[in-house]
Image (cartoon, grey):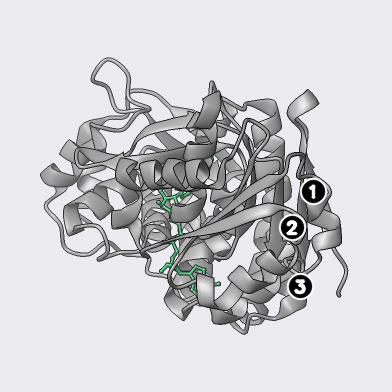
Amino acid sequence: MNMTTTVDVALGARSYPIWIGAGSLADAVRWRGIIRGRHVLVVTNATIAPLYLGRVQAGLQGFAHAALILPDGEAHKTLANCAAVFDALTALGASRDATIIALGGGVIGDLAGFAAACWMRGIQFVQMPTTLLAMVDSSVGGKTGVNLAAGKNLVGAFHQPRAVVIDTDTLATLPPREYRAGLAEVVKYGAIGDVIFFEWLETHANALNARDSTALAEAIAASCRHKAGVVARDEHEHGERALLNFGHTFAHALETETGYGTLLHGEAVAIGMVLAARLSADLGRASNLDTDRLAALLAALGLPVAPPRCDPDHLIAHMRLDKKNLGGRLHLILWRGVGYAEIVADVDEMTIRAVLAG
Ligand code: NAD
Ligand code: GLY
C-alpha cells in the first residue's frame, strides 16, 4: 500500500474526505469505517465490474451487500436506470441507513449519487471514481443527476458523498483518449485560478503523458484541493463555482452540434477553453500570448485545441440554452490570463461569432 493523500471538503457537518492513493480500493479498513448501516449497494457498469468490483466486494464482508451492473455509456444515465437502482435497493431490503457505492466514471457517479439523493429522501453514498475526469471533477462536489431525451443533466440534485475513494491504480486500464480527456479538466484548475499549478503542468506534461504515478497523484491531489475549496466556499453555485465551467459553454455547444460521442467531454472542454481565451483576447480582456500558452499545454497533453468545422450560428443557438444566461443575454466564463477566470455578463454576440468562425 502506497501513501494516501487526504483532501477534506469542508462543509460543516457534511464535510467529507477525499482519499487519494495507489491501491485505495483494496484499503477497506479505511473506507469501511464511514459506512453506518448494514446494507450496501455497489452501482457500477459492465466494463468496470470485471476489473474492480471484486476489490470493493472483498471489503464488504459483514455487510448485506449487492451489486447492480448497468450497461456502459452516457446513453444509460437515465431515469429508467435510476429506477433500476431503487429496485436493487428494494431487493436488498435497504433502509434509510443504507449506503450506495458508485464505482465508475462520471456517468455512474452522477446516476448512483442521484439515486442516493432520492431513495427515502436521501441516503449516504461513497464515490469510487475510476476515470481521471471523475477523480478530479465529477466525484467531488455533490452534483448528481441523469439525462432526459430533451438534454443532458436536466434532472438532478445536490447531494454530497460521505467520502471519495480515489485509487490511482485504476487509471492503468483507462483508454488513452479517456485519460487525455480527464487531463483537460486538470488543466482547467490551473487556467482558472492557479498560475503555479499551470506552470507545474507545463513542466510535467511528459510525465503525465507517461502516466507517471507520482506526477499523477500530485495532479489529482492539486485538482481535488481546488475543487474542494471552491465547493466549500460556494456549494450551490451562487458565484465562484461557476468559474469551474471555464470553456464549458463552448464545449456543450460543440458536443450538441457534433452529436454526443463525437468529441469526448474533456476534448470539447479543451477546445472550449481555447475559444474562451481567444474571445477574452478579442474583447481586450487578456493577451493572445496567454491563449497560445494554454493551447500549447493542451496540445502537449495530446488534446485538440481547434473546433471541428461547425456553423457558428448553430453553436451560438446552443450557447443560448446555457444555464448561466440571464434575460436572453449570453453570460460566459472568460479570463484575464492564465490563473484569472471571471464571469462576464452580456458578451457581445458579434465577437463570439467571429471567434467561432476562426
Ligand atoms: P464515463 O463514466 O462514461 O467513463 C468513460 C469510459 O471509461 C466508460 O466507457 C467507462 O466504462 C470507462 N471506464 C471507467 N473507468 C475505467 C477504468 N478504470 N478502466 C477502463 N475503463 C474505464 O465518462 P466520464 O468522463 O468519467 O464522465 C462523464 C460524465 O460525468 C458525464 O455524464 C458528465 O455529465 C458527468 N460529469 C459530472 C460532473 C459533476 O460535477 N457531477 C462533472 C463533470 C462531468
Ligand atoms: N463540474 C462543475 C461543478 O462541479 O460545479
- Which is closer to the viewer, label 2 or label 3? 3
- Which is closer to the viewer, label 3 or label 1? 3
Helix or strand or loop: what does disc 3 sit on?
Answer: loop
Number of marks drawn:
3
Q: Is residue 236 visible?
A: yes
Residue 23, which numbered label? Answer: 3
Graded by Cα atoms within 10 Å as few (under 14), some (14 to 19) or many (20 or more), the crowding at tag 1 reads some
Indicate the quadrant containing the C terminus: top left, top right, bottom left or bottom right.
Answer: bottom left
For marks 3 and 1 on the same chain, the one whose residue lies earlier in the sequence: 1
Residue 221, which numbered label? Answer: 2
For marks 2 and 3 on the same chain, the one whose residue lies earlier in the sequence: 3
At label 2, which amino acid type do we have?
Answer: Ala
At label 3, which amino acid type do we have?
Answer: Gly
Q: Which residue is mark 1?
A: 7
Q: Quadrant of residue 67?
A: bottom right
Helix or strand or loop: what does disc 1 sit on?
Answer: strand
Horizontal arrangement in the rendering, residue 99 relative to residue 72 (left or right): right
Indicate the quadrant containing the N terminus: top left, top right, bottom left or bottom right.
Answer: bottom right
Where residue 44 sits in the image (x, y, percent)? 50, 60
Residues at circles 1 and 2 in contact by the CB criterion of under 8 Å: yes
What residue is at 27 percent from the left and 15 percent from the top?
A: 327
Viewer-proximal residue among 256 and 293: 256
Q: Residue furthest top?
A: 327
For marks 1 and 2 on the same chain, the one whose residue lies earlier in the sequence: 1
Judge whether 170 appears above or below 357 on screen: below
Residues at circles 3 and 1 in contact by the CB criterion of under 8 Å: no
